[in-house]
């Protein structure tokens, strides 16, 4: 007999039927649930994230600490820290904490000088990065897209060189979407009447975004003349709402050194290959941040410095048509067919859960409105009706 958990099952013979029957009765009790012993000790490991721009663009360093297993949040923000950048020539630049745990610096730096990041926590602990040499990224050669039977592929091409062979790309996506039922009307509780919405009150057109994309890396040395051609960044599947009307992607290309590349590659494998027996262990992810106050302390994260390159493109629905869109949130949305008469506006629309969608006319007189549920018509429940500053129509 073979022991599985705390239950014994017969070998694979005709008597296996008996074990199978018992297993059905016991609702699959041939395996006991595994409950690992997990410590709830609060290690409070410092996590450092960030890239320092040398070309005058904003640099961000994000500090946080790990939380015990079982807490609702995996990280707590590291606030009120002193974060500064020191150059080998003796200059110092201070980061400002603009948001909790998020430290910002805008400065133009010399790409021929080495730099070191210094962090002093509010609790008096000091951390120093290794000395870092800026790496200048070449310009993005091409940022384009291909429409095929599997959707739309957005790709990047670039030309590396001896000083810039390892690349990391990040991107931000923004797109226009519309609700299932469009309305330009609103109920005014003061006048107890339905009236047109102002432009700043529109709920029939919104923007959504994705600013936490996956890790994308490439080693240009693998290719002839260090030329990277059409490296896929994003794959938009058919019916995706991102191409409903107009879509924008901003790609930032960073040239990094091999050590930084190795760090991100291990991190990518840990995130993409979770559970694989050949996946690298999280403990193998080293950091270039050293704890000075307590050398035994662990720090997670990798900070790098350089001059990045960026490019933005827009894709219109007409560029990929036909492109029917499916939004699960609106799957069962319909405008109701019962007329809400003028006398019933307050009771029907007063709570805000139903909205006036389309007027019901008798000749030239509006006698009421067809209603719609707010979650089917108000796009601000899923996005923002404020146009992004960079957006081009």
Image: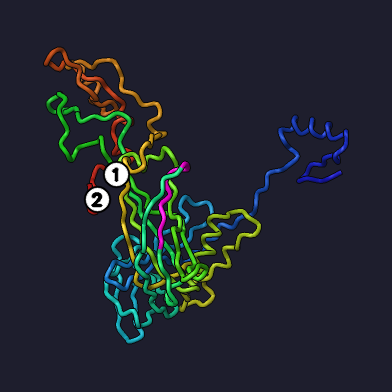
Foreground tag (1 vs 2): 2
Q: Quadrant of residue 91?
A: bottom left
Q: Is 1 on the left or on the right of 117, as rendered?
A: right
Q: Which residues are magenta?
A: 149-157
Q: Which residue is rendered at x = 12% and y = 26% of the image?
A: 191
SS under mark 1: strand
In this view, the residue farthest toward the front is: 224
Q: Quadrant of residue 51?
A: bottom left
SS under mark 2: loop
Instruction: Report crowding for label 1: few under 14, some 14 to 19, many 20 or more residues within 10 A (C-alpha).
Output: many
Q: Residue 75 or 93: which is nearer the viewer?
A: 93
Q: Position of residue 368 (x, y in %)?
A: 19, 17
Are the two marked residues, 1 and 2, in contact with CB atoms closer than 8 angstroms? yes
Above/below status of 56 relative to 6: below
Q: Residue 276 or 85: which is nearer the viewer?
A: 276
Above/below status of 148 relative to 306: above
Q: Position of residue 71 (x, y in %)?
A: 49, 52
Q: Is residue 48 magenta?
A: no
Q: Is residue 152 magenta?
A: yes
Q: Quadrant of residue 312?
A: bottom left
The residue labelled by disc 2 is: 391
Instruction: Give the quarter of the figure containing the N terminus.
Output: top right
Q: Position of residue 350 (x, y in %)?
A: 23, 25
Q: Which residue is rendered at x = 78% and y = 44% of the image?
A: 6
Q: Main secondary structure of the magenta part?
A: strand
First reached walking from the N terminus: tag 1 or tag 2: 1
Is there any visible trace of residue 120 in the rendered image? no
Q: Residue 139 or 21: which is nearer the viewer?
A: 139
In this view, the residue farthest toward the top is: 362
Res. 207 mark:
1
């Amino acid at each position: 007999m073979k022991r599985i958990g705390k239950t014994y099952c017969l070998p694979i013979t005709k008597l296996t039927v008996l074990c199978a029957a018992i297993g059905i009765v016991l609702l699959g009790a041939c395996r006991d649930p595994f409950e690992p012993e997990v410590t709830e000790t609060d290690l409070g490991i410092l996590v450092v994230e960030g890239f320092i721009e040398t070309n005058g663009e904003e640099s961000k360093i994000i500090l946080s600490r790990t939380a015990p297993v079982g807490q609702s949040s995996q990280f707590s923000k590291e606030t009120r820290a002193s974060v500064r950048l020191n150059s080998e020539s003796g200059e110092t630049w201070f980061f400002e904490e603009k948001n909790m745990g998020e430290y910002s610096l805008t400065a133009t730096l010399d790409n021929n000088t080495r730099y070191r990041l210094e962090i002093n926590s509010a609790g008096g602990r000091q951390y120093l990065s290794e000395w870092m040499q800026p790496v200048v990224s070449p310009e993005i050669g091409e940022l384009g897209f291909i429409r095929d039977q599997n959707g739309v592929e957005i790709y990047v091409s670039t030309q590396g060189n001896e000083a810039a062979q390892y690349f990391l790309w990040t991107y931000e996506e923004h797109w226009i979407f519309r609700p299932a039922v469009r309305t330009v009307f609103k109920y005014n509780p003061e006048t107890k009447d339905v009236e047109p919405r102002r432009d700043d009150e529109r709920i029939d057109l919104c923007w959504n975004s994705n600013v936490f994309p996956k890790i994308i890396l490439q080693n240009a040395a693998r290719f002839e003349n260090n030329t990277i051609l059409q490296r896929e960044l994003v794959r938009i599947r058919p019916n995706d709402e991102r191409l409903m009307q107009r879509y924008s992607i901003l790609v930032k290309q960073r040239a990094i050194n091999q050590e930084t590349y190795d760090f991100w590659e291990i991190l990518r494998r840990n995130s993409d290959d979770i559970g694989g027996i050949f996946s690298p262990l999280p403990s193998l992810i080293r950091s270039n941040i050293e704890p000075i106050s307590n050398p035994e302390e662990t720090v997670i994260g990798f900070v790098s410095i350089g001059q990045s390159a960026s490019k933005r493109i827009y894709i219109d629905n007409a560029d990929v048509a036909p492109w029917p869109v499916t939004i699960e949130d609106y799957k069962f949305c319909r405008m109701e067919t019962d007329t809400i008469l003028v006398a019933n506006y307050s009771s029907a629309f007063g709570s805000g859960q139903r909205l006036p969608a389309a007027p019901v006319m008798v000749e030239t007189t509006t006698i009421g409105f067809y209603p719609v549920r707010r979650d089917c018509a108000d796009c601000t429940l899923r996005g923002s009706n404020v146009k992004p500053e960079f957006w081009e129509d």
